[in-house]
């Protein structure tokens, strides 16, 4: 990179391997501060679900695929303020496991 002095924090490249999570970089794609509006939550939900079930890539537009993406989007949007409201006193992390537990 020729413009390294222009960056306060140097950018890095990380990958998430859905097939072998031990080889993945650890990150939190559901961090509420990185999703200011509904489109970010919808893109995150779509990426997570299509990454977990690759057959759905061929079936995009199907009712069951789109409804599950919309359901996950709604959970992401609704649960972020709920978690911040009820768990202020704890140092909780908003992760995919929290979303799974909430959806069940």
Image: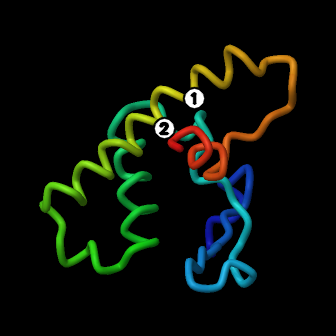
Q: Nearer the viewer, residue 73 or 24?
A: 73
- How many neighbours does mark 1 have within 10 angstroms: few (below 14), some (14-19), or many (20 or more)? some
Marks 1 & 2, CB-CB < 8 Å contact: yes
For the point 42% across and 42% down, the residue is: 41
User: For residue 55, what is the image quadrant?
Assistant: bottom left
Check disc 2 and report the residue beneath it. 76
Q: Position of residue 12 (x, y in %)?
A: 68, 69
For the point 67% across and 14% down, the residue is: 85
For the point 59% across and 35% down, the residue is: 32
User: For residue 74, what is the image quadrant?
Assistant: top left
How far is mark 1 from mark 2, CA to CA? 6 Å
For the point 41% across and 45% down, the residue is: 72
Q: Position of residue 60 (x, y in %)?
A: 18, 66
User: For residue 4, what is the image quadrant?
Assistant: bottom right
Q: Position of residue 31 (x, y in %)?
A: 62, 42
Q: Nearer the viewer, residue 35 or 54?
A: 54
Check disc 1 and report the residue beneath it. 80
Q: Position of residue 43 (x, y in %)?
A: 36, 52
Instruction: Determine whether, in the image, residue 14 is placed left or right of residue 9.
Output: left
Relative vertical location of residue 11 with respect to residue 45 in this rendering, above or below = below
Residue pushed farthest top?
85
């Amino acid at each position: 990179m020729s413009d390294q002095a222009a960056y306060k924090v140097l950018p890095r490249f990380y990958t998430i391997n859905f097939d072998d999570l031990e080889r993945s970089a650890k990150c939190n794609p559901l961090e509420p501060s990185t999703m200011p509006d509904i489109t970010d939550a919808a893109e995150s939900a779509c990426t997570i679900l299509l990454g977990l079930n690759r057959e759905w890539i061929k079936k995009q537009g199907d009712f069951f695929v789109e409804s599950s993406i919309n359901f996950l989007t709604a959970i992401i949007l609704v649960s972020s303020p709920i978690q911040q409201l009820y768990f202020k006193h704890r140092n909780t992390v908003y992760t995919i496991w929290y979303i799974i537990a909430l959806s069940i």
